[in-house]
Amino acid sequence: MIDVILAAGYATRLYPLTENFPKPLLRVGGRTLLDRLLAETDAIPAVTRHVIVTNHRFVHHFEQWQTQVGYTRPIEVLDDGSVSNGTRLGAVRDLLFAINSLNLQDDLLVAAADNVLDFSLDGFAAFFAERQASVLMCGYEPSVEALRRTGVAIFDDDGRVLRLEEKPQVPSSHWAVPPFYIYACKDLPLICGALDNGCGSDAPGHLARYVAEHAAMYAWKMPGRRYDIGDMAGYRQADALFGRREGEFTE
């Protein structure tokens, strides 16, 4: 399994903090968002390699970061060539860029680098191994307003995804879908042809919806919380929360 981390956005809602600096390298509770994610994905036995897709404007920040960290699996940083928010490729095109540039043919763990989890990803990987099909993560969200800002999953009693909605005004369920997916290698031909067959290119949920419409895909209920660092309020909340937790733990 190859871990593909999408980190090519420009985080305009966090300006001026991210005007000249990538959001995934911001520190939350003393550790970068990217390091928090890699600490989880690097611990999954099936993962053999990490691929980080960023943009041309920020690639040097990631290359410098790469010289200062050490993980058990090798890390490759890819530059998607975009230089501004207006020229960004979008999450789906960035994933396809990684697949085509590196000729990836393995199962793919795909995650956005601007989320923090308070639980291990071991269960997610085990669920994929059990189902032998593409899977996504979901979490119960009671707030309709919050559901209107994210992907929403509808699935049957066996967990098979029946439908995915992207930022619905009238959500059909309370199961929110954060940007964490494992795509089975058998679905790669489907993924590679997605854009040519009408799949949206911006949000990663567009690809998950396309895959679920054409192949078996299952939903894993996450056992904890995830924190979306989407704006300054979310960033400050997560930074304070994880800072307090880990400060108390290390005392």
Image (tube, rainbow, N blue to C red):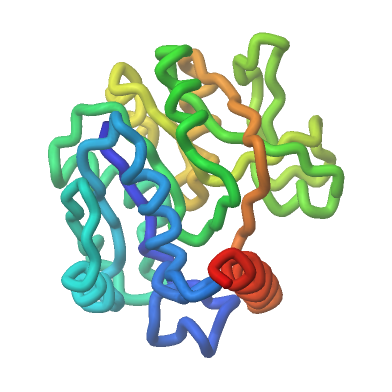
The residue under the point 59% across, 27% down is 220
- Tell me where residue 37 sits by quadrant: bottom left
Q: Is residue 86 above or below residue 17?
A: above
Camera-side residue of 251 and 139: 251
Number of marks in the rendered image: 0
The answer to whether residue 16 is left or right of residue 162 is: left
On the question of residue 247 being in view, the answer is yes
If the image is split into quadrants, where does the N terminus sit? top left
Residue 106 x/y as whole percent: 23, 28
Residue at the far front in the pictured view: 251
- Tell me where residue 133 sits by quadrant: top left
Q: Is residue 134 above or below residue 145?
A: above
The answer to whether residue 80 is left or right of residue 209 is: left
On the question of residue 230 being in view, the answer is no
- Tell me where residue 41 sits by quadrant: top left
Residue 91 x/y as whole percent: 42, 51
Camera-side residue of 53 and 121: 121
The residue under the point 29% across, 68% down is 55
Residue 20 x/y as whole percent: 39, 86
The answer to whether residue 124 is left or right of residue 61 is: right
Residue at the far bottom in the pictured view: 16
If the image is split into quadrants, where does the C terminus sit? bottom right
Camera-side residue of 3 and 57: 3
Camera-side residue of 45 and 209: 45
Residue at the far top in the pictured view: 158
The residue under the point 80% across, 31% down is 173
The residue under the point 55% across, 73% down is 29
Residue 109 x/y as whole percent: 37, 37
